[in-house]
Amino acid sequence: MGSRIMHLSIAQVINNKHGFGNDFLIGSITPDVNKNSRTPKELTHFMVKREDGEHDMFPNMFLEEYGTCLNTFQLGYYLHLISDDIWLKTVYKKYILENMSYSKDEALRRFYLDFHYYNGILIKQYKLVILKNNKYLSTGVNEIIDRDISEIIEDLDADFDDMSIEDFPGLLKKEDVEQYINVCVKEFEIFLLKGSYDGVKFVFYNGF
């Protein structure tokens, strides 16, 4: 999936336009709490692992469960899910599944090293700032444990000090990263405009 900084970049572009606030930004990185907890990634990301080890995502399962009254945090959470779905079908497919230059393990190694390379670039480009933890945040999302959120915010804080020593990316091209971010923003804007995604409707409640 895309990096925390990529997810925050996408959310920041949307937040600049709509002013959803800090909880929306927190929601946009929260599905990755599985890295620090015992919660399975398949649960937090509404995804199913295939027999070949790859995953299929079903973001609309989130809407079906919570879409009758989404708060700003949940709106950010859903943004993360559709962004990961787009990532798997575009960037990951191009550089990993269709990779002909390296073994899959080597391609993945280069792929994830590039996350470090782009952190500083994206932080500057999108004028990102460290998120404020909301210790009173009640997410209403059953697939995560709310107290785990502080740890993912700490991981994000560390990303702001994570400056790659590499002069060039090992695999990921900058235009693909930028296109990915732009596509995610566009898809989410369509979602907000239509009030639904793939036929599943939602209601946004900004009362949290």
Image (cartoon, rainbow, N blue to C red):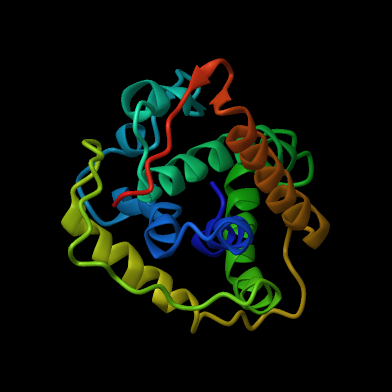
Q: Which residue is more in the foreground, 94 or 101?
A: 94
86 w.r.t. 175: above or below: above
Residue 15 image offset from top left, x and y in percent? 56, 59
Can residue 58 be seen in the rendering of this structure? no
At a point 54% along the width and 41% down the height, the residue shown is 84
Instruction: Name the residue rendered at 26%, 59% in the picture.
Output: 149
State the image quarter where residue 190 is shown.
top right
- Left-right relation of 14 to 159: right
Q: List the single residue furthest toward the top.
A: 199
Can residue 15 be seen here? The reply is yes
Please count the marks in the image: 0
110 relative to 190, above or below: below
Residue visible at 61% across and 40% down in the picture: 188
Question: Dividing the picture into quarters, in which one does residue 137 lie?
Answer: bottom left
* Left or right placement of residue 73 versus residue 19 in this view: left
In this rendered view, identify the residue nearer to me: 192 or 148. 192
Residue 128 percent coordinates (x, y): 56, 75
Above or below residue 132? Residue 170 is above
Picture coordinates of residue 60, whole percent (x, y): 46, 24
Pick the residue in front: 112 or 102: 112
Residue nearest the observer in this picture, 191 or 86: 191
Q: Is residue 42 above or below residue 185?
A: above
Residue 64 sits in which quadrant?
A: top left
Where is residue 198? Give x, y as percent. Answer: 59, 18
